[in-house]
Amino acid sequence: MFSKSSKSQKRVSPMSATGAKNTPFSLIGSDVTISGNLTASVDLHVDGTVEGDISCAALVQGPDSRIVGHVTAQSARLAGLVDGSIAAQELVVESTARITGDVRYERITIEPGSRIEGHFAHEDHSPVTELKLIAGDGAA
């Protein structure tokens, strides 16, 4: 009546129990300092300090956070201090952001009050179309 069957027991791995394997983003809390480069295949939310380069799908930076290094992301929403270059297809610079470094972007939004010291470069990743010049009847 109260016997255990091996068929009814399901072994749960620690990864699936916490849901960490399927987490859509990673969070670096305000009390965390990381020294070293970060690479994430998912979205990254930084509220702490990162001393190193960051490469991720999408980056959200909290207003009290600090990044000292290069940032590479498909999209980035920056609200804290960044001391390093930034390369993002879509970049949002919030009013609390303080950026020192060169910025490469495809689309950019800069809120009033933010401070940026560096060079801006627009990068167009749209498909290149070939232009052909067609000569007329030979008259110049």
Image (cartoon, rainbow, N blue to C red):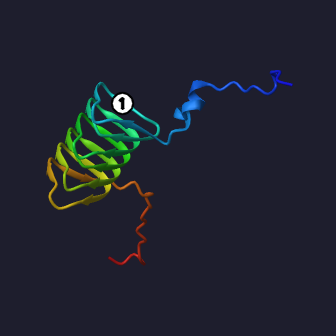
Residue 49 falls in image quadrant: top left
In this picture, is 126 found above or below 34?
Answer: below
Of residue 27 and residue 110, the one placed in the foreground of this image is 27
Residue at the image point whose x is 45% and y is 57% from the top: 127
* In the image: residue 113, left or right of residue 11: left
* In the image: residue 67, left or right of residue 4: left
Q: Position of residue 110 (x, y in %)?
A: 23, 59
Residue at the image point whose x is 38% and y is 37% from the top: 27
Q: Residues within 10 Å of mark 1 (few under 14, many from 20)?
A: some
Q: Quadrant of the C terminus?
A: bottom left
Q: Which residue is mark 1?
A: 38
Q: Position of residue 9 (x, y in %)?
A: 75, 25
- Name the amino acid type tagged 1: Leu
Q: Position of residue 19 (x, y in %)?
A: 55, 35
In this picture, is 19 found above or below 118?
Answer: above
Of residue 81 and residue 29, the one placed in the foreground of this image is 29
Residue at the image point whose x is 29% and y is 58% from the top: 108
Residue at the image point whose x is 43% and y is 35% from the top: 40
Residue at the right extreme of this rendering: 1
Count of residue discs: 1
Q: Quadrant of the N terminus?
A: top right
* In the image: residue 39, left or right of residue 2: left
Helix, strand or loop at label 1? It is: strand
Of residue 121 and residue 35, the one placed in the foreground of this image is 35
* In the image: residue 6, left or right of residue 140: right
Residue 4 falls in image quadrant: top right
In this picture, is 85 found above or below 133?
Answer: above
Q: Position of residue 46 (x, y in %)?
A: 32, 39
